[in-house]
Image: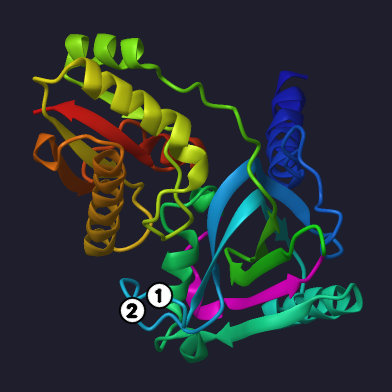
Amino acid sequence: MLVRLLFALSVLIPMSLAAQAQAPRPEPQGSRDHPLVGRYEGSRIHAYQQVAFEEARVIIGPVIRRDVLGEQNIIQASGRQTTITYRATGDRSPLEVLRNYQQTLAGRGFEMLFECHRETCGDRSGSNLWFTLIDRRALASSMHASWDTGRYTALRLKRAEGDVFVAIYVQQAAQMIQTRVEVIEVRGMEADRIRILGASELKSAIDATGKVALYGIYFDVDKAEVKPESKPQLDAIVAFLGANPGLNVVVAGHTDNQGAFDYNVGLSQRRAQAVARALGSAGIAPARVTAFGAGMSSPVAPNDTPAGQGRNRRVEIVRR
């Protein structure tokens, strides 16, 4: 009897484990298809993230080198960002999945901006585009590195309330089809979410640590002109420096780690100089203010999430 029982268990346990291995993984809690895009039949959501406001790069041309990104192959867009990774098994090809998305979105009014596969993505295997799209971005771990099978397309829907960009990357890896869908709904940022630090708060922070991080000074994406909505924070800095005439400061610009290192250093330097000029125009002696571009070299949060990248994009006032 015991022998029969052991034999039965030896058969049932492997069958049970096999069934568990084949059981579909539950979709992430709170995840859903984007209503403007949908999903390819038979796919399941493997990873999901939505951010109310974020900067994003939409690839619209071949990426020949990862450190050469500009108007020729990138559109910078800001707004609500939804990133979804799907997985599916079966005999469908990346081309078939991509063509279905393109056909569906064209019927919804989208125009195609770019499409590529292997060498038409910029280099022989298409790896530069893959790393630009996936590397160190949200959900990177949910996509296997299989760029030689990958196909990419970018589309845009023009709307009065703000354009919508869709970037789709489909590849075959580990006996499955993986699809990454990123949707950027261009819109303005929800304002008044960051409290402006007053002159007394600036003094307290600098007395305590020698520096203070500011998030109330605004720039457009890849631009170095201080936006008008930065005036309340600039006025507070002017009041603080006016009340402390013996204090000299460094205005340090900081970026996240997206883009080439040298480019970010230059951008952060130009932004710091713009803030210094604004303070000079408000009556602060230029000799009291030194502009410095730190680029991505001094993060205050991990750069592997949009929230962390947002914290790293800042201006600091440092006691000199």
Q: Quadrant of the N terminus?
A: top right
The span picked out in magenta is 143-159
Q: Which of 69/250 is in front?
A: 250
Q: Do labels 1 and 2 touch, CB within 8 Å?
A: yes
- Of badges 1 and 2, the one in the foreground is 2
Q: Position of residue 120 (x, y in %)?
A: 51, 90
Q: Is residue 147 magenta?
A: yes
Q: Secondary structure at mark 2?
A: loop
Q: Which residue is mark 1?
A: 128
Q: Magenta span has 14? A: no
Q: Viewer-proximal residue, 11 or 278? A: 278
Taking 179 as reference, is 213 left or right? left
- Mark 1 is on which residue type? Asn
When asked about the image quadrant of residue 9, the answer is: top right
Image side of residue 103 versus residue 272, left or right: right
As displayed, is residue 193 above or below residue 42? Answer: above
Look at 41% across and 19% down and name the residue there: 197
* Residue 6 in sight: yes
Check disc 2 and report the residue beneath it.
65
Mark 1 and mark 2: span between their CA atoms?
A: 6 Å
Residue at figure coordinates x 50%, y 36% from the top left:
307
First in sequence: mark 1 or mark 2? Answer: 2
Which residue is located at x 52 percent, y 48 percent? 138
Task: Note whether residue 296 is visible.
Answer: no
